[in-house]
Amino acid sequence: MRRFRVARPRPSRPSIPSPAARPADRSWRSPAVWRADFTASLVVFLVAVPLCVGVSVASGAPAELGLVTGIVGGLLTGLLPGSSLQVSGPAAGLTVLVFEAVQDFGLGALGALVLIAGVLQLVMGVLRLGRWFRAISVAVVQGMLAGIGLVLIAGQLYALADAKAPGGGPANLAGLPRLAMDTIGSDPALGALAVGVSTIAVLVAWPRLRQLAPALPRPLARLASQAPQVLPAPLVAVALVTAVVAGWDLPVARVEVRGLLDVVQPPGGADFARLTEAGAVGTVLAFTLIASAESLFSAAAVDRLHDGPKTDYDRELMAQGAGNTVCGLLGALPMTAVIVRSAANVQAGARTKTSRVLHGVWLLVFAAAFPAALGVVPLAALAGVLVHAGGKLIPVKAWRPLWREHRGEAVVLAATAVAIVATNMFEGVLLGLLMAVAKSAWATSHVHLEVAGLEGSGVVHVRAVGNATFLRLPKLLDQLEALPRDREIELDLSGLRHLDHACAAALGSWEEQRRGPEGTARAAARSTAP
C-alpha cells in the first residue's frame, strides 16, 4: 500500500481586519463601537418588523407571534456565543412548514413542536454535530430554498388578492387559473392586487435608486444615493403602500391585532399529546433539520461578509436551540438565523453582538407600545414582501452555470424543489439528500478494465482498476462477457481501491462459470481493498 505524507502548513500570522469590518478589535466600551452597534440595531429593527409580521401572517398565526420570535432571537439568542453578527428571527424559509403544522395540529400545538425541535438542537450542539451540517450538499440546500420559494409564492398570490389559499403546494398551483378569473371579476380583489404589486415594485426599485442619482440635481442625487442605505426596502414599501391605502381608504383586508400578551400562550398537556399523532414526528424533525441547516448556512455566508471572529458552529446550534426552546414555551414561531437581517447588520457597520440584542429591545418596545400600528398594514402589502422574498430564494442566476459545469448537482437541485412542491418539506428534503448521496456514489464508483494480449493467441490479461461497486456492476459484467471464450483469461483485481460485496460475488460467479469443464479463466491476484 502506497503511503502519502501531507505537509502541514506553517502557521501564519493572523491577518489584521479592516477597521470597518472587525467586530472584536476594540473594546465593547468604546463610544465608536457603541454608536456603530446602535445605528446597526435600528437598521435591523426596521428590516425585521415587516418580515416578522409578514412571516407570521403567512404562517396562519397572529401577527404578534412573529414579533415574539424576533424578540427572543434578539434578547436571548443574540446574547449567546456562536456567531457574533448574524441575527435570528422568524424566517420565510419555514413559512410553508409552519403553515402546514398549524393546519394539521392547531396553533396551540405549534409551541410544543417548536419546543421539542429546540431541545433536539441543544442536544445536537452538545454532541458537536453542528459542523456536520457543512457536509450537506449545497444543491440540496438550494433546492430546498427554491421549493420553499415556489410554494411561498403560490400561496401568497392568493393573499395578494385578499383570497384564501385552497391548501398545499399542488392545490395552490392548480387553483391559480380560477384565482385569476375571480380577481378580474372583482373590484376589491383588483384593489388588493394593485396594493401587493405596488409593494413588489417598490421593493425592486428602491435598491436601484442609487443608479438614478447621477441624472438628478445635486441635492436629490445625494438623497437618492444615501436613502437606500439608511432605509431598508421592506419598511419603505410597506410604509408607502400603507399610507396610500389609509389616505384613499381602500377596501382591503388589514392585519388583525390581538395584543402581545394575548397571543403568548404556552403549550399545555393537550398540545403535547398531539405529538403522538401521525406526522408529528416528521414535522419536529423537519423543524430541527431545516432550521439548523438554514442557520448554519447563513452563518457561513455572514462569515464571508466580515473579517472578524468566525462562527463556532456547535455553539451557534446550541444558541438556536435555546432560542427555539424559549419560543416553544411561549407558543411562538420557530426561529432561524436570517441572512437578510444578518447582511443588513453587517452592512450597517455592526461591530459586536450588541446590535442584535438592541434590535430585540426595539422589537419589544414596538410590540408593547405600538401594537395598534399593525392594524393599519394591508395584508396584500405583506404578501408582496413575501412574494419578493420567495423570488429571492429561487437561484435563477446560479442555475445556468450550475447546469453547464455540474449537471448532476443541477438535477439534484431541481428534483428537490419539485419534490417539495409536489409533496411536503420533509419528504422533499429527504428525497434530495438521497439523490445527492446516490449521485456522489455514482460519481466516485469509476471502474474500468485494462485488457492486454487480445492480438496474440496466448493468455488475455485483464486488470480491473478503480472502485467496483454495485452501481457499475452491469457495465463491468458486460465487458467481461464480451471477452473471447476460446482464450485463456487471467483476471487481476489488485488494481481495485474498493470492492463491495455485490461486485465480489458477481466476479466470483463469472470466474466459476468460465472455469467450468471447458473454462478458460483464472485469477491472478485478489484486491487487497476491503
Image (tube, helix red, strand yellow):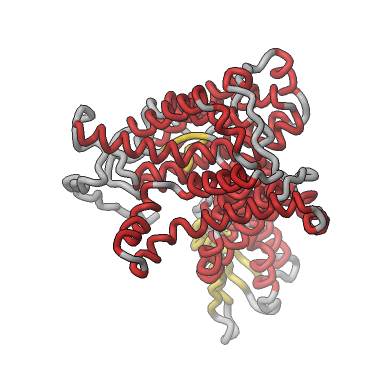
Look at the picture and state if 105 lies above or below 217.
above
**Foreground: 344 or 233?**
233
The x and y percentages for residue 397 are 52, 64
Quadrant, the N terminus: bottom left
The x and y percentages for residue 503 are 64, 57
The mark total stands at 0
Look at the picture and state if 206 lies above or below 133.
below
Horizontal side, residue 83 vs residue 520: left or right: left
The x and y percentages for residue 36 are 27, 38
Look at the picture and state if 213 lies above or below 239.
below
**Foreground: 223 or 520?**
223
* Residue 214 visible in the shown view: yes
Residue at horizontal 27%, vertical 46%?
307
Residue at horizontal 59%, vertical 60%?
442
Residue at horizontal 53%, vertical 48%?
240
Residue furthest to the top: 269
Q: Which image quarter: residue 98?
A: top right
Residue at horizontal 65%, vertical 17%?
267
**Foreground: 421 or 7?**
421
Residue furthest to the left: 13
